[in-house]
């Protein structure tokens, strides 16, 4: 950077609102070395945000909401970098009115999400969670045969995987699953004419052995999996959701699972995160696997996220912003 840019950087304040959301083992120094002044907070409660950003020039947030109220206090704020792909925690009409630039991170977690999605498919297919529980109960130890075959096991080869949402993640999951012998069908947007290589949404539900969700959460996809769409699925089919909790109607899913209208489900995301202890999806539902929003969480993925955030800030400082998000 030139001397004039260096003077500008020296005067700027960066604030990280929820650094601990990136987990253990992540080095933030590639980001914090870019400005002379930083305030790094592990977490920020809603009532703390306004005070914490009031003097900031650059703000990093993963899930902390930046809205009309707290942005009104941020008189110096010029740039927000979201340490995630989803940006529904940003009040875009307000940031556009205030001429605050917003960048996000894209594609950093694809390998991690792909392997987690496949892990969920495989775990459902071999009843892994049931066999683990059987061992803990001592069922194998009491068995009269060398192996325990108390729970269903099936091969995924030649099974049909329906992909709903065919961006980078959906395409990568399709490639990996196809390499394991699965047949891939890709859903068209509901209600739209089918393009080459796509199949009507309803047909995907009717014919797939596994359904994997990889679409964004918006008005058109909210609760896309509901009592009506679940009714289209085969009784021996499985649902996998590593995208957004709001894509699935929780009550409808629980009803389907308890009444065995579908064979099972594996979900990495809930509508409310972290959930409260009364969330019905955390109850003992035998044909449901729940993981705590970790599909993106491989250390390599999180390090790529830091690197992209560094690039976002660097390009902003150079007056050439990248990964800009507008609504």
Image (cartoon, helix red, strand yellow):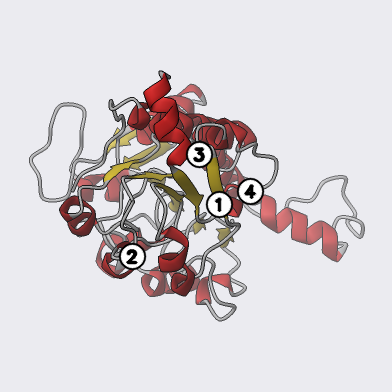
Q: Nearer the viewer, residue 95 or 276?
A: 95
Q: Position of residue 282 (x, y in %)?
A: 57, 71
Q: Answer with the quarter of the image where residue 133 lies.
A: bottom right
Which residue, given by chain and number where applicable, does mark 2 sit on? Answer: 73
Residue at the location (52% across, 64% down)? 44
Point out which mark residue 294 bears.
none
Residue at the location (22% across, 54% down)? 92
Residue at the location (58% across, 51% down)? 40
Asked whether the residues under the numbered discs 4 and 2 touch, taking CB atoms below 8 Å apart as contact, a structural biologist would say no
Q: How far apart are labels 4 and 1 at the CA level?
A: 18 Å
- Which is in the foreground here, disc 3 or disc 4? 4
| Chain-order first, disc 2 or disc 3 | 2
- Which is in the foreground here, disc 3 or disc 1? 1
Q: Nearer the viewer, residue 230 or 84?
A: 84
The quadrant of the image that shows the N terminus is top left
Which residue, given by chain and number where applicable, does mark 3 sit on? Answer: 113
Q: Position of residue 101 (x, y in %)?
A: 27, 43
Q: How far apart are labels 4 and 2 at the CA level?
A: 29 Å
Q: Secondary structure at mark 2?
A: loop
Residue at the location (26% across, 59% down)? 91
Which residue, given by chain and number where applicable, does mark 1 sit on? Answer: 39
| Chain-order first, disc 4 or disc 1 | 4
| Chain-order first, disc 1 or disc 2 | 1
Count every numbered label the image shows and give the total. Answer: 4
Categorize mark 4 by other alpha carbons within 10 Å: few (<14), some (14-19), many (20+): few
Q: Position of residue 29 (x, y in %)?
A: 61, 34
Which residue, given by chain and number where applicable, does mark 4 sit on? Answer: 23
Q: How far apart are labels 3 and 1 at the CA level?
A: 31 Å
């Amino acid at each position: 950077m030139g001397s004039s840019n260096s003077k500008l950087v020296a005067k700027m304040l960066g604030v990280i609102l929820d650094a601990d959301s990136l987990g253990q083992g992540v080095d933030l120094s590639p980001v914090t070395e870019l400005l002379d002044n930083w305030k790094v907070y592990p977490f920020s409660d809603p009532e703390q945000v306004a005070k914490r950003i009031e003097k900031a020039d650059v703000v990093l947030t993963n899930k902390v909401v930046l809205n009309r109220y707290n942005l009104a206090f941020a008189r110096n704020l010029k740039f927000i970098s979201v340490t995630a792909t989803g940006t529904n925690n940003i009040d875009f009409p307000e940031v556009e009115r205030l001429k605050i630039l917003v960048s996000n991170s894209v594609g950093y977690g694809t390998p991690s999400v792909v392997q987690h999605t496949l892990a969920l498919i495989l775990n459902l297919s071999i009843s892994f969670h049931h066999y683990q529980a059987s061992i803990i109960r001592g069922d194998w130890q009491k068995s009269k045969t060398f192996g325990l075959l108390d729970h269903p096991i099936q091969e995924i080869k030649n099974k049909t995987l329906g992909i709903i949402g065919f961006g980078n993640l959906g395409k990568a999951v399709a490639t990996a699953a196809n390499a394991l012998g699965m047949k891939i069908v890709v859903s068209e947007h509901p209600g739209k004419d089918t393009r080459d290589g796509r199949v009507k949404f309803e047909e995907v539900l009717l014919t797939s052995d596994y359904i994997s969700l990889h679409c964004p959460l918006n008005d058109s996809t909210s609760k896309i999996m509901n009592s009506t769409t679940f009714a289209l699925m085969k009784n021996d089919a499985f649902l996998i959701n590593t995208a957004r909790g709001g894509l699935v109607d929780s009550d409808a899913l629980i009803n389907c699972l308890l009444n065995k209208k579908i064979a099972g489900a594996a979900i990495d995301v809930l509508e409310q995160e972290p959930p409260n202890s009364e969330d019905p999806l955390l109850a003992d539902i035998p044909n449901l696997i729940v993981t705590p929003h970790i599909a993106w969480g491989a250390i390599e993925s999180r390090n790529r996220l830091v690197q992209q955030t560094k690039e976002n800030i660097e390009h902003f400082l150079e007056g050439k912003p990248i990964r800009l998000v507008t609504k």
